[in-house]
Image: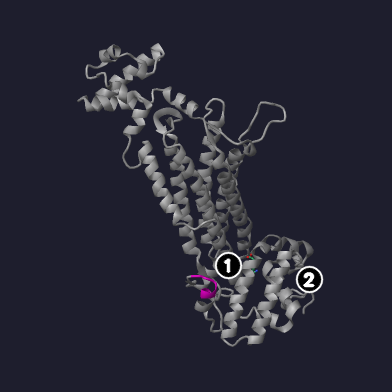
Amino acid sequence: MTIQHKPWGGRFEEATDAFVEAFTASVDFDKRLAAHDIRGSIAHATMLQRLGLLTPQELAAIVNGLEAIAGEIEAGSFPWSVHLEDVHMNIEARLTERIGEAGKKLHTGRSRNDQVATDVRLYLRSEIDRICGQIRSLQMALVDLAEREADTIMPGFTHLQVAQPITFGHHLMAWYEMLSRDYDRLCDCRKRLNVMPLGAAALAGSSFPLDRDYTAALLDFVRPAANSLDAVSDRDFAIEFAACASLVLMHLSRFSEELILWTSAQFGFVDLPDAFCTGSSIMPQKKNPDVPELVRGKSARVFGHLFALLTLMKSQPLAYNKDNQEDKEPLFDTVDTLSGCLRAFSDMMPHVRPNRAAMYASAQKGYATATDLADYLVRRGTAFRDAHEIVGKAVRLGIETGRDLAAIPLEELQVLSGAIGPDVYDVLTLEGSVAARSHIGGTAPECVRKAVAEARVRLAGLREA
Ligand code: ARG
């Protein structure tokens, strides 16, 4: 061994500066990759033995040693050392300490460059599977609530002004749709990341006739990466994942914003369970929607991580550069933040209590059925633009006299248009308005129930959490 006992220390004459050692080390955070690193090493060693580069006895010693190390790590007794820089060298050094000479052969035909790229892909692949399961759980909760609230009437908004009546179930199913796209996007990201860098070695490949197909199969990768330079330097998959995560968080942030508005005294549409809120240290009456507020806030850091990863990559010449070590903390925090927000939402959703009376009363304000009156006139032969004008006048009359459209007597409406008959009140009710929108994608209770049934079929076919 050399003066400083670094696995790469052969050509060095001076010890690493103490600050530089700490500055360049990644073990404090990349130890999270340990299980994947061990799995990759076992597959690599198995392939080396197949080529005759390890004896069966050496392979057995390596596999047993790595499994014992996995046990130490799980038990918290593994002697992590900053001096050994990263997770890869910590594990390799410990292996040699435990099993002797065979441990020194493990790194044959491999570099930390293809090793770390493989570890991160293995890690992210399993996290994507877990997160997809979490998205599915949240969707289940939304679908359950949507089914219960298929007939619940609430105001639908544009510009945050009352626009037209909708059903609460329909609104919930809009959230479901967003999450379906998020799920599909993550599956798509998983497809692209599922190729194996191992065998690319440092950058140019290996002078050993590595059987990369075999190693890829052992690690459940679809195939080995096609170009060694690209294999060690590609972090597109991390950026793509951060983009997918940003979209999920953007959606969760929008849900949060609505829940925050809806729980306010001004709306009063829903109640959140006490367990998901906190109080104020000074104002005794307060019950604050902390969980949605925090989810809305946490979306910001994930958007930041996406930008950090893009910026990290944009100026790197091929192939591996140490810059890449900076991919891990943003990526890990993206996983943790996303997963935590999904967990908070799916735990909370079954306990969201709608206040149906408040939603109904709110839909009665703001002339939400004005479009229905215009459509009614069109069915009676009035051109839509003329109908729009007539209904505008009816709304003005309502505002001036403090009445909703349905409360204006027939004689007064007929002054505005002779086409209006006594059956006009059927379309001016909230129930009539939502029931009329019964085409695909409409808000009618029957459509909500159909969308719920279709969603249940889709969810049954997805991987569970
Ligand atoms: N800790 C490093 C990383 O995360 C591992 C690869 C280091 N390779 C190297 N040639 N220094 O990227």
Residue 8 seen: no
Q: Position of residue 316 (x, y in %)?
A: 56, 62
Q: Between marks 2 and 1, how big is the CA–CA gap? A: 28 Å
Numbered tag placed on residue 21 in the rendering = none
Residue 454 position, x and y percent, is 39, 49
Numbered range of the magenta stretch: 216-221
Type of amino acid under label 1: Ala
User: What residue is shown at x 44% (from left), y 33% (from top)?
Assistant: 152
According to the image, label 1 marks what residue? 117
> Callout 1: helix, strand or loop?
helix
Cβ atoms under marks 2 and 1 closer than 8 Å: no
Quick check: 193 left or right of 281?
left
**Left or right for 99, reference 274:** right
Nearer the camera: disc 2 or disc 1 = 1
Mark seen at residue 15: 2
Quadrant containing ligand 1 = bottom right
* Quadrant assignment for the C terminus: bottom right
Residue at horizontal 58 percent and vertical 48 percent from the top: 343
Q: Is mark 1 within 8 Å of ligand 1?
A: no
Give coordinates of residue 457: x percent, y percent: 41, 52
78 up-or-down from 301: above or below: below
Q: Is residue 70 magenta?
A: no
Query: Relative to the observer, which residue lies in front, 130 or 100?
Result: 130
- Residue 107 at what x, y percent from top left? 64, 78
Residue under the point 68% across and 63% down:
31
